[in-house]
Image (tube, grey):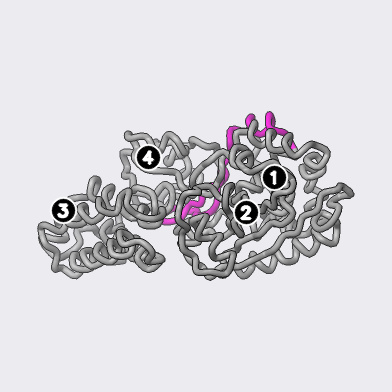
Amino acid sequence: MGEPFLLKYVAEPDQTDYDAYVSRGGYEGLRKALAMAPDQVTEEVDRSGLRGRGGAGFPTGRKWKFLPKDPAVTKYLVVNADEGEPGTFKDRTLLEGDPHRLIEGIVIGGYAIGARHAFIYLRREFHRARAILQQALAQAYARGVLGERILGSGYALDVILATGAGAYIAGEETALLESLEGRRAMPRLKPPFYPAVKGLYMQPTALNNVETLAHVAWILARGADWYRAQGSPILISVSGHVRRPGVYEVELGTSIRDVIARAGGMRPGRAFKACFPGGSSSAILNEAYLDTPMDYDLMKLDVYGSMLGSAALIVMDDTTCMIEVVARTVGFYRDESCGKCTPCREGTVWLGQVFERILQGRGRPADIDLLQGIAKGMTGTCFCPLGESVPPSIASSIRFFGSEYEHHIRTGTCDVAGAAA
């Protein structure tokens, strides 16, 4: 990997201040962008190979190209700063430690697509991040990098900070837009599929993640060629049974084993058992998959059968009861379901009832098949990805840890030493 840069300044105590940010090269990317044509900015981002860091991994430049070029058409830029995927906290790290990087990325993105208004949709629980962002936005307006005639150019952009109510469903882009417009966060009917066609207020909209726009600021400051030479870096949120949980900057494609090593390895005296490589919506992998590359495309291959998602690596050691983990995961999605579609609304409840029966020592031999059957009925049938996030953990846990399910059902107890600790 090349030079680490995404986390380069987040630990500096004054990095949230405008002057300190500028002293370290901040807003140079914006100055370069404003000297280019908007299409050139989009092309530079596209040429860099940057893929969205919100979970889908869609090429950012290509997403911007979907928006109409007609300057008479109102366009919006929306930032998804909700970060609701369990185990994910990389965006919050950037928001609290390097807020002007996000603002710079927003202005560059807004200029590229021709937006005059941008919205940051922030998770309400991020109280510290909100206070820091409000201060950074005020500084940006005062110093002329937001508002009218940005840095003396003819471009103008206003940024509005909006907060959601902490709903996981708002991570789905159309549900986020519904919430931003003042309605309940529920996914919209598709087509049109892309917010680039009918987005915020039914106008063409580019919706990007916090980390994605932080990359954009660096790309315009240093250039697409420099960025590609860095090996396509990505931030990984590492949590669970490791010595040093935290956010780590690694090259895309780094193995799970190497990321765990960066986090100090497993807890003393404990062995790796399993992990969620991309947050709780990804399929669980066991120790045979420690060398799996953390990559958007490779992880989806049948040989691995999981996904990188929001790059949230949740590590579990040999004291973990997998049935309890999956039951808690199902409970989370049950509580966060918006209730719009039957497979998700009903399926998560039924799954929760089966898991409750097993964990209370009343499991039945047919329960494993029942869990798989309900999960299969939720696959490819849900209105949005929330319900589709449940089956992977069930199928993979039964695949790798079926004996634990059988023991629970047969004896009514857990056979994992230390699981109750």
Marks 2 and 1 in Cβ contact (< 8 Å):
no
Q: Picture coordinates of residue 347 (x, y %)?
A: 28, 61
Q: From the viewer's side, name the closer residue of 96 and 188.
A: 188
Residue 354, placed above or below residue 50: below
User: Which residue position is annotated with label 4?
Assistant: 290
Quarter of the picture holding the N terminus = top right
* Residue 181 counted in the magenta span: no
**Alpha-carbon distance for marks 3 and 4?**
28 Å
Q: Nearer the viewer's eye, disc 1 or disc 4?
A: 1
Query: Helix, strand or loop at disc 1?
Result: helix
**Alpha-carbon distance for marks 2 and 3?**
46 Å
Q: Amino acid at mark 2?
A: Gln
Q: Is residue 37 left or right of residue 276?
A: right
Q: Is residue 17 left or right of residue 250?
A: right
Q: Nearer the viewer's eye, disc 4 or disc 2?
A: 2
Q: Which disc is residue 203 wearing?
A: 2
Q: Residue at x 33, y 60 (%)?
A: 344
- Is residue 328 shown to the viewer in this render? yes
- Disc 3 crowd rating (10 Å Cα; few below 14, some 14-19, many 20+) is few
Which of the two labelled residues, at mark 1 and mark 4, occupies the earlier sequence position? Answer: 1
